[in-house]
Image (cartoon, helix red, strand yellow):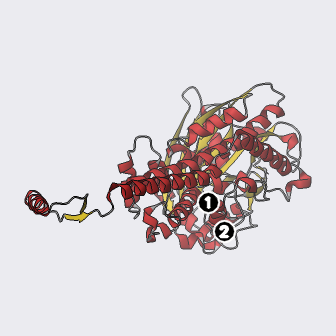
Amino acid sequence: MNIFLPPPYNILYARRLHKTVRRLVPDSDVRFLLSESGSGKGAALVTAVAYRLAEQHRQIEETLEEFQLSKEQLLEVKKRMRIEMEAGLRKKTHQSAKVKMLPTFVRSTPDGSENGDFLALDLGGTNFRVLLVKIRSGKRRMVEMHNKIYAIPVDVMQGTGEELFDHIVHCISDFLDYMGIKGARLPMGFTFSFPCVQTSLDAGMLLTWTKGFKATDCEGEDVVLLLREGIKRREEFELDVVAVVNDTVGTMMTCAYEDPNCEIGLIVGTGSNACYMEETKNIEMVEGDKGRMCVNMEWGAFGDNGCLDEIRTVYDKAVDELSLNSGKQRYEKMISGMYLGEIVRNILIDFTKRGFLFRGHISEALKTRSIFETKFLSQIESDRLALLQVRVILQQLGLDGTCDDSIIVKQVCGAVSKRAAQLCGAGMAAVVDKIRENRGLDHLDITVGVDGTLYKLHPHFSKIMHQTVKDLAPKCDVTFLLSEDGSGKGAALITAVACRLREAEQS
């Protein structure tokens, strides 16, 4: 520790001072350094430091301003989402459209009369679930669920399609043994949370893998057929695969069982997507003009044609370039949990290079991709967390920063997540306004079923998104209903509805 002393500097006084300090704090090594230039130079240095900090603050603010979207910009995002939705629905432009608006052949939400035992498979990430869902109708209608969660190793995710589906069937076999129902031929719904073109409720051709999956010989193939072939290879049990379902559709159906006004599904977690009940007459790829059908928007690809380039930053582009699917899912990469942490990390690296953070030292931890998981962003932005606790989180990540560093990191996380919530809200505003106009209403009351870790766990995301929808779609009164049981229950409900409709047609 250094102590600066101003002149005049009496030698006898100095010796006594040194001796007294050593006696009072024997465990500290204190050195006294004589100031040659006095307080004038010090005042200049204080001024210089203050100027440097002010300039640093200005540059940080200037950089983060790129993430602050005005209402006009958000209205433009809403407008462009609507244009892309229309392109996806039309037969003439569907092939080239980025927002695919895929028909799901789900024509009805539950009416409460569904009854029976159903299996559901929920595949949408590195973990998946197998469920037994018991649905009972009548006055005391209820849904009873049993499930097990299984992991998909990375080598299976990125191996061959046969290996992937053999692994899935092996897990189904284990679950049937676990529940003691291997002999029963139960109807099953398959929640498959990847872009698919459906030609019927029980047939879905995989367009492209997302979320880190790269299994070969699957893209362009019917995933229900791949599952059935896997079951045949196993030769242990039989299943009636009734429906293939996107997780957004499953979420919508789960919430519709609780609230009949729910006609939209939204996922904001590792990835992001939405679905809603569209008028069948507007879906030009499907024959018929009566009733409604659920459309899987696959809105994550919004912006892949460049229509969002004006608001994409250099950090968004860096994250995109290093991703497994470079150039694709650009909207999703600006709003979902799989990518927000990477955007934050790229900003922090840039700020460190410019000397704003971590004393200008880029640690090995900061060089590590995906170090900032969604849960860390949620923790850092918590209003209940003091700066010292934020600093502890950074230290757990291998980032040894000061309290000043913690302030900047929290500021960066806030800017990135706020933009994500606003962009998500702009997309949802386009959906609810389209439904209102479809039905010729001056005012629409509607419920959105929502699932996903980012929406559930982030302290501010949902509130900002809700407010954005309210601001951009003032003629719509939108209620957001959290899906407690996930899309697996929805797959079982879709299967139950399909079985009910099938029985009605046969009778």
The picture places residue 225, in percent across and down from the top left corner, at: 71, 63
Say if residue 375 shows up in the picture. Answer: no
Q: Quadrant of the N terminus?
A: bottom left
**Quadrant where the image shows the C terminus:** top right
In three-dimensional space, the C-alpha distance between marks 1 and 2, rounded to whole angstroms, equals 44 Å
Quarter-of-image position of residue 493: top right
Kindly indicate whether the residue at mark 2 contacts the one at mark 1 (C-beta within 8 angstroms). Answer: no
What residue would you read off at disc 2? 321
The amino acid type found where label 1 is placed reads Glu
Nearest to the observer: residue 109 or residue 138: 109
The image shows a total of numbered marks equal to 2
* Residue 202 percent location from the top left of the image: 73, 54
48 or 293: nearer the eye? Answer: 48
Residue situated in front as seen by the camera: 388 or 138: 388
In-image side of 402 versus 18 (left or right) = right
Query: Residue at the location (69% across, 39% down)?
Result: 264
Mark 1 or 2, closer to the camera = 2
Image x and y of residue 106, in percent: 74, 44
Q: Decide which of tag 1 and tag 2 comes sooner along the chain.
A: 1
> Where does residue 295 sit, x and y in percent of width and height?
76, 46
Identify the disc placed on residue 238.
1
Q: Identify residue type, mark 2.
A: Glu
Q: Secondary structure at mark 2?
A: helix
Residue 137, by quadrant, is top right
Residue 71 visible? The answer is yes
Within 10 angstroms of label 2, few (less than 14), some, or many (20 or more) residues? few
Decide if residue 18 is on the left or right side of residue 442: left
- Vertical placement of residue 98 versus 381, above or below: below
Image: 232 above or below 313: below
Q: For residue 294, what is the image quadrant?
A: top right
